Image (spheres, rainbow, N blue to C red):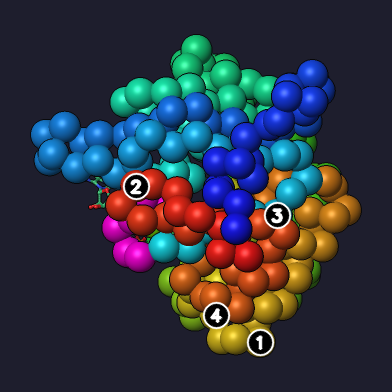
Amino acid sequence: MKKIQELYTTSDNEKERSAAEIAIEMVAVSKFYQTKMVKAINDVTLRIKCGECVTITGPSGSGKSTLLRLIASLDQPTQGQIVVDGVPLAGLSGDALAAFRRVHVGMIFQGFRLLPALTVLENVMAPLLPYTAAKPLRAQALEMLARVRLAPRASHLPGELSGGEQQRVAIARALVANPRVLLADEPTGSLDTETAHAIMSLLQDVQAETAMTLLVVTHDARIAARAQYRIQMEDGCLKEDIG
Ligand SMILES: Nc1ncnc2c1ncn2[C@@H]1O[C@H](COP(=O)(O)OP(=O)(O)OP(=O)(O)O)[C@@H](O)[C@H]1O
Ligand SMILES: [Mg+2]
């Protein structure tokens, strides 16, 4: 069984290849919450190539959401370097940081984070509305809602939807901007088995169509098994590949 570091660390031959082929690179990354004495991420080194589908499983509290937040630059590491889609995150601030999140990454949050006062359609349009003309964006958002089978709910408020429906809106919102890297935190956690597999198929279809890189956190072994590569986390560290 190959160690996870070997699976994801570039070999000597591969080092000669362009860095652009690596979608996510983390080198010796740690995240400590000093005031709480918590080591959420502990010396993680990881390289994921462009266009790959990778799933992360691990017990509650093992650092999965923290890892995704660091890659999305929603949080900063205490130590180590992170490069996403060729962009070193350490130097980003202000407009550059906002542009990085808008252009390079899509995030499906564990708690959905829909805006309660906006309709379903407006929620899906929200990330791009200040940057893209509303008319074509509306059509794009409606098309994405149709793909998660929620077009009939476009004018509803999130509070009028079931948990699984809210989750599907969050998925449509993350996909509408065609991100290069999609970070999905338990994207099927509130869905029945059939819908969960349909959503995973949708994510993988979009991945194949757009050559997007897909990183999915899941507690569901059957969803995890559908990925090319699987990572297990424990106590903030990567464990050996289970595939
Ligand atoms: N802001 C914070 N301050 C202190 N500790 C934190 C903070 N955020 C997360 N932690 C701790 O970091 C660890 C990792 O949390 P994280 O949310 O990444 O876990 P997880 O693997 O996503 O768990 P789950 O499967 O329950 O979602 C946990 O022990 C958590 O209590
Ligand atoms: Mg989590």
Quote the CA–CA distance across marks 4 and 2.
Answer: 27 Å
Magenta stretch, residue numbers: 59-64
Q: Is residue 137 left or right of residue 119?
A: right
Name the amino acid, label 3. Cys
Q: Is residue 20 left or right of residue 194?
A: right
Point out residue 176 in the picture as x, y percentages from the top left corner. Answer: 72, 50
| Looking at the image, residue 153 lies above or below residue 28 | below
Name the amino acid, label 4. Leu
Name the amino acid, label 2. Gly
Label 2 neighbour load within 10 Å: few <14, some 14-19, many 20+: many
Residue at 25% across / 41% down in the picture? 39
Point out residue 198 in the picture as x, y percentages from the top left corner. Answer: 72, 77
Q: Farthest residue toward the right?
A: 209
Q: Is residue 88 left or right of residue 143?
A: left
Label 1: state its secondary structure. Answer: helix
Q: Earlier in the sequence, mark 4 or mark 2?
A: 4
Residue that carries the numbered disc 4 in the rendered image: 191
* Front disc: 2 or 3: 2
Q: Quadrant of residue 20?
A: top right
Q: Which quarter of the rendering shows the C terminus? A: bottom right
Name the amino acid, label 1. Glu
Residue that carries the numbered disc 1 in the rendered image: 194
Q: Is residue 79 left or right of residue 188?
A: left
Q: Which quarter of the rendering shows the N terminus? A: bottom right
